[in-house]
Structure formats: C-alpha cells, structure tokens
Image (tube, grey):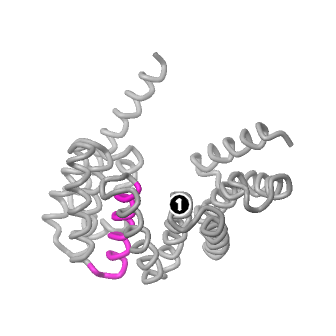
Amino acid sequence: MPSGTLASENNLAIVYRDEGKYAQAEQLHAQTLEIRKRVFGPDDPNTLFSMSTLANDYDDEGKYAQAEALHVQTAEIRKRVLGPEHPETLSSVADLAIVYTEEGKYAQAAALDEQNLEIRKRVLGPEHPDTLGSMENLAADYVSEGKYPQAEALLLDTFEIQKRVLGPEHPDTAAILYNLSCLEARRGDKERAFALLSQAVDHGLPVRGDLAIDKDPDLASLQGDPRFAALVGHAKQVAEAKQKAAATQTSK
C-alpha cells in the first residue's frame, strides 16, 4: 500500500478519534501498524508513530492493559533507537505515565513524570512547552496521591511561567487556574475553588475544557451550589462564542 494511502488512513483514524469513534480509529490504526511493520520494519519512525497512536486508542477505549503493553514496547524501542532523552522517547514515557494513572498506579506514574521533568528541564529548558506539560502531569500525579501541597507548589510554578511566557489570557494559562480550582475543590476549600474556577472561565479555557466542567469528578464538591450552575452556563456560552468565531474565521 503506498505511503500516501497509509497517511490518509492514519489521518482518517485521527478524525474518528476526535469524533469519539474510538473503535473505528483503533481498527484503522491497527491496520496501518501491521502494514508499516511489514513494509518498514519494527524500528522505523512511522511504525513507532503507529504503535503510539494505537496505544492511545486503547487508552481512549479503557483498554488500559493493552495500552500499557504497547506504550512500554514503544518506549523501549525509542530508547534503543533514538536515545533516552529524545523528545519522542519522552513522549512515549509521558503517555505510559498517563495510562499508569488511569490504572491507579500513581506512584509509578509519578516516578516516570519526575524523570521526564528532570530531563526536559535540562535538555529543553524550564520554559519549553514540553517541560511545562511535564510539570502539569506531575502535579496531577501528586493530586492523585493526595500530595496536595506538592501539587499546589508545582501548579503555581507552572502558572507563573506560563503567565510570563504565554500571557495571562492564553488558554494553557487558564487551564492551570482550572487545575488549581480542582485541587482546592478536592481539599474542601469551596470559596477558593469557585474564585479560581471563575478566573479560569473568564480568562478563556480551551473549548473542550469549557464544555466539560460539569462532568469533572474533581469538582463534585461544588455541584449543587447555584454558583456552580452559573459558571457552567457561562463556560458553555464562552465555548459557543469561540466556536462561532473559529467558524467565521475559517469561512473567510
């Protein structure tokens, strides 16, 4: 099968995933991976990319054991072929840590994310987007482990860097405020949680974040409060406005 056809199938699979059609995405990615292994070999970058995307499909479907096994395999090959500090290797390790978190293996996830953060700080610098992503991931691990002071310190460090580098109105900066709100809600400080959540919505979360607030279990302690319903409604209005603006821009 021509490489262009494989790329088209892979792109279609990504569309399926974005639409929540995870089984269709998995089927196409599995087919592409089998062909790439046979044509290019197991160590080829295109094959490794297909392994990573298929593992993410398994993760999306809740097939965590299969996702873990494939992410481990991908990370090991990338370590051997590309080196332990290559960005793609570190991405595989980060994906594996996410699966560990979803399996409840919080200590293992934190160990990988701590390792990734140290390498990315040293190799990429403290303000690189991948480094900031590692900081967020590790903070999430700490929250899962109940290490709230460590999580708060790391999130505040991330917020200050993103505010300086990206600006206070950037969606990624707002996402840190949102994560801090979730942390405070879990700790039982409703007033601070509401204040941070309001700031996050006003500053402009990514659209997916705006639309998922009422489904976030970390904010469960806020549900039932009229302020929460008002914030959810406001967030959805903000998301709809962004979607309309994006559609208008695309049509020009």
Residue 163 pos. (x, y %): 21, 49
Q: Which residue is mark 1?
A: 86
Q: Quadrant of the N terminus?
A: top right
Amino acid found under the numbered disc labelled 1: His
Can residue 214 be seen here? The reply is: no
> Label 1: few (<14), some or many (≥20) within 10 Å?
some
Residue 206: quarter of image: top left
Magenta stretch: dominant SS?
A: helix
Residue at coordinates 64% horizontally, 51% vertically from top-left? 21
Kindly give the residue lying farthest to the top in the view shown.
252
In the displayed structure, 231 sits above or below 141; it is: above
Q: Nearer the viewer, residue 61 or 54?
A: 54
Towards the viewer: 194 or 151 = 151
Give the answer, above or below, for where 215 lies relative to 13: below
Q: Residue 184, how many percent across, how many down?
A: 21, 69
Examine the structure image and report whether residue 144 is included in the region drawn in magenta: yes
Residue nearer the viewer, 41 or 49: 41
Which of the 4 image quadrants contains residue 155?
bottom left
In depth, the one of 55 and 241 nearer the eye is 55
Residue 156 included in the magenta stretch of the image = no
Residue at 23% across / 56% down in the picture? 159
Q: Which residues are the magenta region?
A: 130-147
x then y, percent, for residue 196: 19, 57
